[in-house]
Amino acid sequence: MQTRKATNRTKLIKAAATLIERDGYKNIDVTKVTKEAKLGYGTFYNHFSDITDLFEEITKEVIINIQDFVIELSDHETSPLKQIFIRNYFQFHAFYGSPILEWVAENPTFLMKLWDENTKSVTNKMIKQVIKKGELKGDPIELLDRFENIRETYRWNFLGSLHSLLAGKDPDIAFVDNSEGVDIFSMPYQEKREFLTSIVSEYKKHSSKIQRIFLNNS
C-alpha cells in the first residue's frame, strides 16, 4: 500500500510538472492533473490538500534534490567556501530548468521558509568550517554575525534573479551577477570574480543534470 501511495504521488507531481511546463501553472487544476496522471479525482486528496499544496511540494522536491545533488557532486572539494557557492550556482540552474519557476518567483516567502527548514542548518555548519579552516580572515563571531545579516540580502537578491531567469537570462551570468552584487565574505572584487567564474567553468558541464531533476527522482 505504501509503495502504491508513493507511486501515485510521483505520478501526480510529474503530471503537474508536465502541465505547468506546457500550459503554465495558472491554467491547471485538480481535474487536469489527475486526468494527466491517469488517476481518479479523489486520489489527489490522498496526497495534497489543494493545488497550492502540490506546487509547494514540487518546490520542496527541487530544494531537497539540489542539496543532495551538490553534496554528492562536490564531496571531493576541500574548500567549504567553494561548496557554499557551488550550491548557490546549482540553485540558478535548477530553477532555470524547472516548470515551477514562475510560481516560485511569485511566491518568494515560501522559498524563504523552505531554505530555513532545509538548508539553513547545513549552510551554518559550512560557514563555521570556512572560518575554522581560515578561508575567511577576521574575528569568528564578527564573521558569523556578518554572514547572518547579509544572508537575507543575498537570498532576496536571488529571488529577484528568478524574474531575470524567467525573462531568459543565462543562469551562469545570473549566478555571477547575483554573487558579485552582495559582499557576503568581503572578498576583493577581482578575487571574487575569478572565484565565481572558476566555479562556472568547472561545474557548467553538470548543470543540465540538475535541471528538472525532481522529474527523474521524485
Image: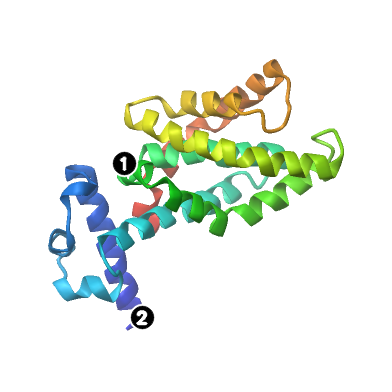
Kindly identify which numbered label has been placed on residue 139: none
Residue 147 placement (x, y as % from top left):
70, 40
Question: Along the polypeptide, which appears first: circle 1 or circle 2?
Answer: 2
Residue lying farthest to the bottom in this orientation: 1
Distance from disc 1 to disc 2, alpha carbons, whole Å, reads 32 Å
Quarter residue 182 falls in = top right
Say which residue label 1 marks.
Answer: 102
Q: Is residue 57 left or right of residue 51?
A: right
| Residue nearest the observer in this picture, 187 or 64 | 187
What colour scheme has been applied to the protein in the rendered image?
Answer: rainbow
Snapshot quadrant of residue 33: bottom left
- Secondary structure found at label 2: helix
Give amino acid for label 2.
Gln
Please, which residue is most extreme toward the top here?
A: 190
**Would you place residue 198 above or below residue 6 in this image?**
above
Look at 62% across and 44% down and name the residue there: 74
Q: Quadrant of the C terminus?
A: bottom left
Mark 2 surroundings within 10 Å by alpha-carbon count, few (fewer than 14), some (14 through 19), many (20 or more): few
Residue 130 in sight from this viewpoint? no
Whole-percent x and y of residue 32? 13, 59
> Total marks drawn?
2
- Does 18 sit above or below residue 33? above
Q: Residue at x 41, y 37 (%)?
A: 208
Q: Are marks 1 and 2 in contact (CB under 8 Å)?
A: no
- The amino acid pointed to by label 1 is Glu
Q: Position of residue 154 (x, y in %)?
A: 57, 36
- Where in the figure is residue 64, as x and y percent of width and height? 49, 56
Residue placed at 44% from the left, 43% from the top?
210
For the residue pair 119 and 218, the one nearer the viewer reads as 119
Q: Which residue is mark 2?
A: 2
